[in-house]
């Protein structure tokens, strides 16, 4: 089975994916794959530097993802910058995900494709089942402020920019303990 996991920032997508990896699932993380496309002198790197300037580079010429994030989301109306970033990153990311999923499907592997931007990356065409992970906005905010060292305004910009599927195959709430969450994941998988 190819399982898509999505949810808003801080909901617990990666925690769910890590749990499934511990059970033998192969995890394809959209964020990790996207970041690999940012490597110096790759086409995505060149286009990001052209559009957002060398201000997004570290001294070693790698993309400083925090600077890029700050540049994109700090604008008053961040949607234009976000649209530019997505236009650069999404097509090659979608092609890479599609290629990896096809190969793993051919090999009969259980795969988790995880990412917040399910619609933009066309998860419905890649996965057999779609699962949404949900958390209260306040809980997600606390998690992201700690993890990413951003402020509430930046969190809200991310949160509000992310949509969820209207008809997922399962919804898993991540409001309790880690053990509760793992149990909810197991229960949802048993029903898929």
Image: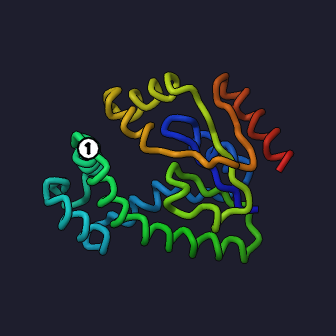
Label 1, residues with CA under 10 Å away: few <14, some 14-19, many ≥20? few
Q: Residue at x 40, y 27 (%)?
A: 146
Measuring from the top left, give residue 52's x and y in whole percent.
Answer: 19, 58
Q: Please indicate whether residue 131 sits to the left or right of residue 136 in the image.
A: right
Q: Mark 1 points at which residue?
A: 77
Q: Residue at x 63, y 70 (%)?
A: 101
Q: Residue at x 33, y 63 (%)?
A: 38
Residue 47 higher or lower than 143, as above or below: below
Q: Please indicate whether residue 130 sits to the left or right of residue 142 in the image.
A: right
Q: Please indicate whether residue 91 sits to the left or right of residue 122 in the image.
A: left
- Camera-nearest residue between 187 and 159: 159
Residue 175 higher or lower than 70, as above or below: above
Residue 59 higher or lower than 16, as above or below: below
Measuring from the top left, give residue 53's x and y in whole percent.
Answer: 14, 60
Measuring from the top left, give residue 54's x and y in whole percent.
Answer: 14, 59
Q: How many marks?
A: 1
Determine which quarter of the picture holds residue 118.
Answer: bottom right
State the scheme by which the image is colored. rainbow
* SS assignment at label 1: loop
Check the picture and name the quadrant holding the N terminus. Answer: bottom right
Q: Residue at x 28, y 53 (%)?
A: 80
Residue at the far right: name it. 191
Measuring from the top left, give residue 104's x and y in whole percent.
Answer: 67, 71
- Camera-nearest residue between 158 and 32: 158
């Amino acid at each position: 089975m190819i399982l898509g996991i999505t949810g808003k920032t801080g909901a617990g997508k990666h925690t769910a994916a890590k749990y499934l990896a511990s059970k033998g699932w192969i995890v394809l993380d959209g964020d990790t794959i996207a970041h690999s496309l940012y490597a110096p002198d790759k086409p995505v790197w060149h286009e990001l530097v052209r559009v957002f300037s060398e201000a997004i580079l570290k001294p070693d010429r790698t993309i400083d993802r925090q600077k890029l994030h700050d540049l994109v989301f700090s604008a008053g109306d961040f949607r234009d910058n976000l649209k530019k970033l997505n236009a650069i990153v999404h097509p090659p990311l979608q092609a890479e995900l599609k290629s990896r999923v096809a190969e793993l499907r051919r090999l009969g592997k259980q795969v988790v494709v995880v990412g917040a931007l399910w619609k933009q990356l066309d998860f419905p065409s890649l996965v057999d089942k779609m699962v949404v992970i949900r958390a209260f906005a306040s809980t997600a905010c606390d998690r992201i402020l700690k993890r990413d060292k951003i402020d509430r305004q930046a969190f809200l910009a991310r949160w509000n920019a992310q949509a969820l599927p209207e008809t997922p195959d399962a919804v898993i709430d991540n409001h309790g303990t880690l053990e509760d969450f793992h149990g909810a994941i197991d229960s949802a998988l048993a029903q898929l």
